[in-house]
């Protein structure tokens, strides 16, 4: 059961990452994205954190 939950979590996080990348204008491809610059990766991560904080605030 644990493996199934972990796989669903990975898939959800991958969708969230792709959605965030699209919002900041970074084109990600499925699989390896080793050609991203640090700036692009940071923009994606920053957008993900911003969305998580916003979601947390709306739950309060």
Image: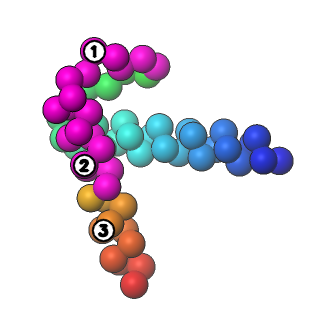
Q: Secondary structure at mark 3?
A: helix
Q: Which residue corresponds to mark 1?
A: 35
Q: Secondary structure at mark 1?
A: loop
Residue 39: x, y in percent? 16, 32
The residue range painted magenta reads 31-49
Residue 4 falls in image quadrant:
top right
Residue 60: x, y in percent? 39, 84
User: Farthest residue in the bottom direction?
Assistant: 60
Q: Between tags 3 and 2, which lies in front?
A: 2
Q: Secondary structure at mark 2?
A: helix
Mark closest to the chain's N terminus, 3 or 2: 2
Magenta segment's dominant SS is: helix
Q: Residue at x 42, y 17 (%)?
A: 32
Determine whether label 3 and label 1 are within 8 Å by CB. Answer: no
32 to 25, vertically: above or below? above
Residue 16 falls in image quadrant:
top left
The disc at residue 46 is 2
Mark closest to the chain's N terminus, 3 or 1: 1
Q: Residue at x 31, y 55 (%)?
A: 49
């Amino acid at each position: 059961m644990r493996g199934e939950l972990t796989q669903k979590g990975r898939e959800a996080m991958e969708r969230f990452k792709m959605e965030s990348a699209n919002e900041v204008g970074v084109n990600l491809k499925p699989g390896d994205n080793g050609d991203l610059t640090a700036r692009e990766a940071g923009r994606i991560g920053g957008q993900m954190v911003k969305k998580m904080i916003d979601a947390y605030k709306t739950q309060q």
